[in-house]
Amino acid sequence: MDNYRFIFSGGGTGGHIYPAIAIANELKRRFPEAEFLFVGAKDRMEMEKVPQAGYQIEGLWITGIQRKLTLKNLMFPFKLISSLIKANSIVKRFNPHVVIGTGGFASGPLLRVASGKGIPCVLQEQNSYAGITNKLLKDRVQKICVAYDDMSRFFPKEKIVKTGNPVRSDLVALNIDRSVALEFFQLSTSRKTVLVLGGSLGARRINELIFEKLEFFRDMGIQLLWQCGKGYIEEFKVNTSESVKVHAFINDMDKAYAAADMIISRAGAGSVSELCIVGKPTFFIPSPNVAEDHQTKNAKALENESAAILIKETDLEKEFEQRFNAVFNSEEKQIELAKNMKALALPNATNAICDEVEKLLQLNRI
């Protein structure tokens, strides 16, 4: 039997959406006749990204709780009740065999309803510090797929499976020639290249740092491949030159990684998982504006393994040049970071998560 029905719920950020799409794609490969439905939060990016990936999505009227007293917080109980009612209707109508939650507001009501009806549920936690929705659901699900060690701090040990985070399949087989990649971005093959990533929307502080350090990089003979984000392209594209290539967004990330000698990046779970597979010396500058400061915790987990350099935004002014120089001028340090980064890679995450889903299907087969 492969005409199974799967519901995926998760969203709010790319870190929740793209893993869900990757898992759905692999389950679709395994079960070509299966039906898929995504459930997200209305007005969040999943309502656009999921249909682009070829899947149907329905939206719940749900948001998170703000840290201060706002009108949105006063509306939360009404949104929660509305979402539970709609989730109940969706689950009853679609009658899934398994529900997979990847974090984010919408997965709370959906998995609560599904688990209450006895439908097997799987959680996928991307970060080293578990999100609030997944923590609330931990006792209601059968399996929890994680990417880091020591997650029994948050979840029942017997439910945890360390799988890693799904990444794009083109990165797993990263075999593009460096010179071809550099030519693609119109960069020199004789200079060291630093790839700068602030996420798809960009990162104000990272962009300011790169702008401030353009002369520093130039004096070191470094060229930059700089993804500044679509919100910042108008401001920073004037810095484009022979040795500085500024992009709003880089679609060909496999080529970007192949071109890079070193990388400066935010520390979202998806980025960290990709960069472990890529295995290049990396400086993580975590966003301080995310729930429970999870980017700092993600980066710290790698720094503890001597696999990456963590620099907080507040320390950039006094530490960046010195710590960058220490790595740039030491081939030994670069080799150590790359080797330790690669050792943490889990390139088969998508398959491992789908294996867990399949086991639940077998267990519940009548």
Image: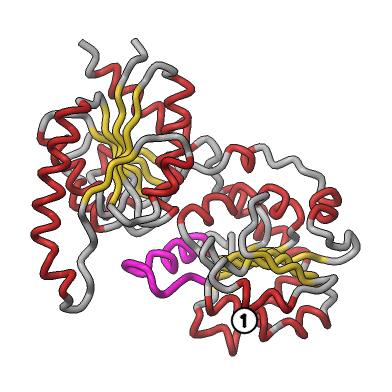
Asked where in the image residue 130 lies, by quadrant, the reply is bottom left
Quadrant location of the N terminus in the rendered image: top left
| Dominant secondary structure of the residues highlighted in magenta in the image | helix
In the orientation shown, which residue stands out farthest toward the bottom? 318
- Residues shaded magenta: 285-302
Q: Position of residue 93 (x, y in %)?
A: 17, 28
Quadrant location of the C terminus in the rendered image: top left
Q: Position of residue 278 (x, y in %)?
A: 65, 50
Left or right of 300? Residue 237 is right
Residue 299 drawn in magenta: yes
Asked where in the image residue 246 lies, by quadrant, the reply is bottom right
Q: Position of residue 201 (x, y in %)?
A: 51, 65
Residue under pointer 1:
209
Residue 329 appears in view: no
Residue 324 appears in view: yes
Asked where in the image residue 12 lies, by quadrant, the reply is bottom left
**Residue found 26% across the figure and 38% down from its top:** 159
Q: Position of residue 116 (x, y in %)?
A: 10, 36
**Residue found 67% across the figure and 61% down from its top:** 281
Render colour scheme? secondary structure
Asked if residue 215 is positioned above or below residue 49 in the image, the reply reads below
Within-10-Å neighbours for mark 1: few <14, some 14–19, many 20+: some
In the orientation shown, which residue stands out farthest toward the right? 190
**Residue found 63% across the figure and 43% down from its top:** 171
- Secondary structure under tag 1 reads helix
Left or right of 20? Residue 266 is right
The amino acid on which the numbered mark 1 sits, given as a three-letter code, is Leu
**Residue found 65% across the figure and 52% down from its top:** 279
Q: Nearer the viewer, residue 102 or 336?
A: 102
Residue 258 drawn in magenta: no
Asked if residue 359 is positioned above or below residue 211 in the image, the reply reads above
Asked if residue 163 is positioned above or below residue 278 in the image, the reply reads above
